[in-house]
Image: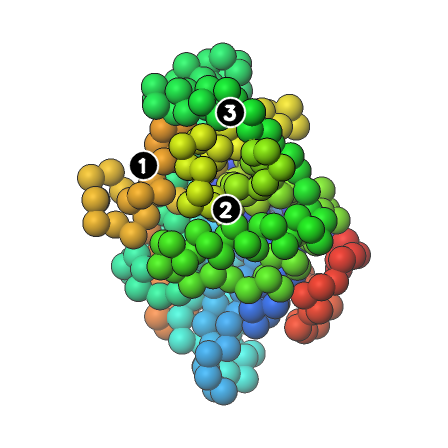
Amino acid sequence: RWQAWDRLLAATPETGFMQSSWWAEFRTTAGFEHFGVMLKNGGTILGGAVVLKFTYADDRCFYYVPEGPVLPGDEAVAGAVFDATLKAIEDRRRTEPQTVSHLRIEPRWQRLPRFVSGFQPVRPFSDVYFEPRNTLCVDLRLSEEAILAQMKQKGRYSIRVAQRHGVSVVQDASELGLTDFQRIYEETAARQGIEAKPPDYFQFLLSLLSSRHCGSLFFAEHQGTRIAAAVVVYFGRRATYFFGGSLDSRREIMAPYLLHFEIMRVAKALGHEWYDLWGTAPEGEADHPWHSISVFKRKFGSQRARLPSIYRRQPVAQRPLRRLYDLQSFRTSPPRMLNPRATDCAGE
């Protein structure tokens, strides 16, 4: 069931890796449990959702659907799938020993469908579970020359500067690579005044990405020193820049620009159609926490994607079904905390 679900996701543009089986498994390390809803018409999967459950008090939890629910392209069918998905989630809520305070969805839809009602938008950065709603995506279907041409002049210039300085780009998800990444990432986090994630987070993340061949760890090197890094996730049509950083030294050689251009080349060669730069400040918001990194990302050109708000429904409520489809719930083995150093999770 998980394999069939992941295949559907890979072919569905308006969702992402946070609805995948491996992401649900990964989030158990942060205390999330998970269950799934799969809607089928005969033998065809129409959509549904992987639902994360987080317990924040002994008797209270909430449900969370990142990058979902997953809906078909036909809006009439999508409305019925959405209704049926909510009904299944509501049925699950009624069996919970805890109080479910709310259902939260973070859809990757290009627009909010007319059939969505009863949800309230969540203000950005109002809690720690926020994921980006503005992003930039570089079209990798273009030729390499066209990708460069659509960049801002400063972006192309910075790539050439890095090339003249002899910067090279390598992939390394070994223990040494993880150590080098953590050093670069923590320096970047301290410089930006944000809390860095612990090494165990990246050890488990990279073990999953490597074992499932769905991501990599890239470095920009100069004279034997790694000075910029990026964790990249491959999923469906997109390659996503998920985490990264750069050292404050040697900034004049522009290594991060060449790093991302080489990542685009690798992703394009692997058949991905878009390079998602994963999170930018809205245009014109100079005081936004992501303003500085957004200025950097915009130099790669790209197309701006403005996703709908995050929505929450409180309390979780049942909506009438428009059409009855076969409803199939699925889940993995009982939720548990995993060893963050595990290296083989492919069988989960």
In the displayed structure, does residue 25 sit left or right of residue 320?
Answer: right
For the point 46% across and 13% down, which residue is it? 146
* Along the viewing direction, whichever of 22 and 78 lies nearer the viewer: 22
Q: Contact (CB < 8 A) between labels 2 and 1?
A: no
Q: Earlier in the sequence, mark 2 or mark 1?
A: 2
Q: Contact (CB < 8 A) between labels 3 and 2?
A: no
Residue 46 location (% of width, % of height)? 58, 44
- Say what secondary structure mark 3 lies in: loop
Badge 2 crowding class, 10 Å Cα cut-off, few under 14, some 14 to 19, many 20 or more, is many
Q: Earlier in the sequence, mark 3 or mark 2?
A: 3
Residue labelled with disc 2? 244
Q: Residue furthest bottom?
A: 58
The answer to whether residue 263 is visible is no
In the displayed structure, does residue 247 sit left or right of residue 171?
Answer: left
Report, in whole angstroms, how far the alpha carbon at label 3 lies from the one at label 2: 21 Å
Q: Amino acid at mark 3?
A: His
Badge 3 crowding class, 10 Å Cα cut-off, few under 14, some 14 to 19, many 20 or more, is some
Residue 196 location (% of width, % of height)? 47, 61
- Say what secondary structure mark 2 lies in: strand
Residue labelled with disc 3? 165
Report, in whole angstroms, how far the alpha carbon at label 2 lies from the one at label 1: 16 Å
Badge 1 crowding class, 10 Å Cα cut-off, few under 14, some 14 to 19, many 20 or more, is some
* Along the viewing direction, whichever of 275 and 326 lies nearer the viewer: 275
For the point 41% across and 20% down, which residue is it? 156
Q: Quadrant of the C terminus?
A: bottom right
Q: Amino acid at mark 1?
A: Val
Report, in whole angstroms, how far the alpha carbon at label 3 lies from the one at label 1: 23 Å
Q: How many marks?
A: 3
In the displayed structure, does residue 122 sit left or right of residue 181?
Answer: left
